[in-house]
Image: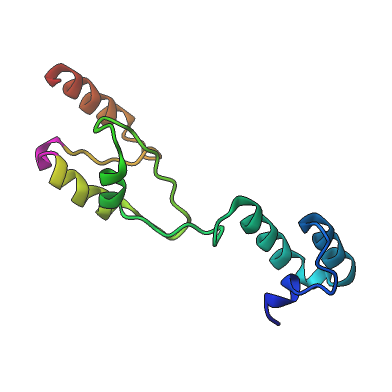
């Protein structure tokens, strides 16, 4: 089946929401595709899935060099290598520390943080 099914309605004078209700009523198997189409058209975008951007690209887009950003990874992905490469480019390797928040090494983490605050 094609996505054109949700676009080609006999009556063109229906609102986007009314078309969505018709799809839900007569073709519930096509509802997800119709909802995605509705969201994209209302938001004026081509896709709900943004293109993947690397950290280097995000760094160049940021106006403030001290801006922080949050990395949210999905199961099976590990951004650690990319973060490490970027850190080595932006700061000295000696100033980059990596640790897991779930480990039992909380004392070691606190020691690193205390040492770094003393050094500035």
Q: Pick the quarter of the image with the C terminus.
A: top left
Relative to 27, does residue 1 appear above or below in the rendering? below
Classify residue 77 by image quadrant: bottom left
Q: Is residue 90 left or right of residue 105?
A: left
Find the residue positioned furthest to the right.
25
Q: Pick the quarter of the image with the N terminus.
A: bottom right
* Residue 60 spot, x, y in % from top left: 25, 45
Classify residue 18 by image quadrant: bottom right
Q: How is the image coloured?
A: rainbow
Q: Residue at x 80, y 61 (%)?
A: 20
- Is residue 94 within the magenta segment? yes
- Is residue 12 within the magenta segment? no
Counting every numbered tag in the picture gives 0
Relative to 94, does residue 66 appear above or below in the rendering? above
Q: Residue at x 80, y 72 (%)?
A: 9
Q: Residue at x 18, y 24 (%)?
A: 116
Q: Of residues 90 and 110, which is closer to you in this image?
A: 90
**In this picture, which residue range is highlighted in magenta?**
91-95
* Residue 106 spot, x, y in % from top left: 33, 30
* Residue 39 spot, x, y in % from top left: 66, 55
Q: Is residue 63 left or right of residue 46?
A: left
Q: Of residues 93 and 10, which is closer to you in this image?
A: 10
Q: Residue at x 15, y 41 (%)?
A: 90
């Amino acid at each position: 089946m094609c996505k054109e099914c949700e676009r080609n309605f006999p009556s063109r004078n229906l609102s986007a929401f009314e078309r969505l209700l018709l799809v839900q009523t007569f073709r519930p198997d096509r509802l997800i595709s119709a909802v995605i189409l509705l969201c994209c058209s209302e938001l004026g975008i081509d896709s709900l899935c943004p293109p993947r951007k690397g950290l280097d690209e995000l760094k160049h887009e940021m106006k403030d060099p001290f801006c922080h950003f949050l990395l949210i990874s999905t199961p099976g992905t590990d951004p650690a290598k990319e973060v490490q490469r970027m850190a080595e480019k932006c700061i000295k390797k000696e100033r980059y520390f990596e640790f897991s928040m779930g480990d039992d090494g909380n004392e070691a983490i606190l020691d690193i943080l205390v040492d770094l605050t003393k050094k500035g």
